[in-house]
Image (spheres, rainbow, N blue to C red):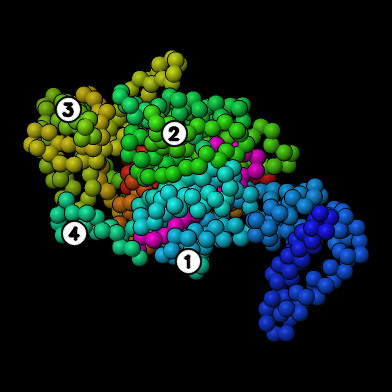
Amino acid sequence: MVEIEAERKKGLFVCLVLICAKRDGGGGGGGGGLGGVERSISAFWRIYQNTEMTRNPAATIDLIGEDLLHNIVARLPAISFASAASVSRSWNIVCDRVLCRPKLSSACSFNPSLQAAVEEVLNKVLSEPIRPHFAIASIGPSFDLQQAHQLITTKLGSQVPVITNDPSGIIGRDAISGEFKEIQWEVTEEDDNTDAPLILPESANRAIMLIVGFLPGMKVRKIPLLKHVEEPEYVMVDKFVMDIREFSTSVSGHKSPAAIIMFSDFQAGMKSVMEKMDYALSPETVVVGDSGCQFKHTNGINGSSRNTTDTEEDVSVAVALVFAVDRNKPIGIGKTQFHAVLSSGLSPIGPTYKAASVREKHHESMTWITGRREGTRENLDGETILNQVYDELGDRIQFPTFYIGVTKKRKCAVGQEKVRHITSLAFHEVLGDNQEYFFVGDVDIKTGDTFRFYHSDSTMALSSAAAVSNHLRSFNQGSTTTTDSDKRDVFGGLIFTCCGRGESFFGQPNIDSSPFLDNFPGVTLGGTFCGGEIGRCDFVPYATESPEQKPERCCLHVYSAVYLIMSYTP
């Protein structure tokens, strides 16, 4: 056993020196080459053999110096770094100093083989020291979701919370070429037959994006939103909110966590879920994500042994990565902050209306509406209302998508808490009319609710993206604000943008990514195209009919891009 342990230490030490020598130029051509590597190994190994290092790994620091050991382990890939940290307590202390700041790592692969694509992104995100606290993987529709999830969780281990989802496209940097890309899946339909199966071009839809994060001083928990599938069916929103509060309280002493990243399918009813979360959580809690995707999640938990999972009666319709500040974080660990910023691609059109007659079609997830202009008594049928909107827009925009933004005043409570009134803004897509009514997607619109029409607008979206870029300059590395130290650094970002945007919407590529990339070159950014952008942001840039009106809170958006900015203050 002693000989085996000595060989293990010898092998680890040789690997460290080999990597150090290679990255310092020993691996190049021109006469240096392997000779430089061999000389480094030989010199260090003579020290190793003639000292107490074979019996006392801590002696390494005494003999080669803490600075050199720090330099060596800082160049290791994540798995070797983890091995180095386990050699001895003194090595672990050095490794902790290497990873004393938060880190976000991301990569994309467009390899047509799932196994090869997963290997490429894992190799890239784990090519430097990192201890994964969470991981998010997004895959193309031509890959198998369960298989991809299994491959990633096997590599990262059971203790790392992993969410794998299938969005409408991915955003990130190619692991091989280093090129930054915004890629939406190519989905075609046979002729004009709506009953024909969708065709997925294999070459265009085999891709994966992986994000891995390390956040010292914080704890991360994966919490599912469950739906009871036996009659009567219902989404367990109160339990979800209370689980988030319980975790945050146990870690930070505060009911509300620092941030939440969510993924949900269309069964979750995210409009009502986000309304209750907005009501229940502190205004400082940032929430972002995708409300229209399929997903898989592990039961890995960082910093806790408690767990929740699906049963035969209850299934996950959404899942949240919850980030809470650890009140027992080690001395010297700084402050990690999350900031959410919204870029809108909607323009308002026409006056404000009030819903006069409302018919909900729950089985079709649709609402039929008539209305009247606010301040008048004349009821207008659906066809008349839509014709007024179309006439006002004219031919300024080809093939716009229309929505109504509904201002809802509702009673809300969590569990047995006191009921309060909340006001929120919710968007519903306009689907058509039958002369008497016009139709919108989803339900929960009531007689007396006010609404205004909006349409997708690339000009508005470009202007909003420019405004976001200007706003992000205040986050730039080295910036000084009235509330934060001038040492605040942005170390990573995520973007969730509407599947209706992208190159076909703007007429040029990478517009949604540009506000982040222009302000933080070299900083990690990853993201997805979504079927509904979750964004609980400080500022909601939706115009009101009058300048005196205050915009209502909105947490679920359309034709928008939601940016999550992660910053660190030592």
The crowd level at tag 1 (other Cα within 10 Å; few <14, some 14-19, many 20+) is few
* Marks 1 and 4, how far apart at CA: 33 Å
Q: Which mark is residue 179?
A: 1
Residue type, mark 2 in image: Asp
In the rendered structure, does residue 275 fall within the stretch colored magenta?
no
In the displayed image of the protein, which residue is found farthest to the left?
435
The residue that label 3 is drawn on is 359
Closest to the camera, between mark 4 and mark 2, is 2
Q: Which residues are magenta?
A: 204-221
Few, some or many C-alpha atoms within 10 Å of disc 4 (few <14, some 14-19, many ≥20)? few
Q: Quadrant of the C terminus?
A: top right
Q: Which residue is located at x 30 percent, y 57 percent?
A: 505
* Cα distance between the residues tagged 3 and 2: 34 Å
Q: Amino acid at mark 1?
A: Glu
Pair 1/2: label in front = 2
The mark lying in front, picked from 3 and 2, is 2
What label sits on residue 310 in the rendered view?
2
Quarter of image, res 419? top left
Graded by Cα atoms within 10 Å as few (under 14), some (14 to 19) or many (20 or more), the crowding at tag 2 reads some
Residue farthest to the bottom?
Answer: 30
The answer to if 217 sits in the magenta stretch is yes
Is 552 or 280 nearer to us in this picture? 280
Percent position of residue 542, x then y: 34, 40
Mark 3 falls on what kind of element?
Answer: strand
Residue 171 circle label: none
Magenta span: helix, strand or loop, mainly? Answer: strand
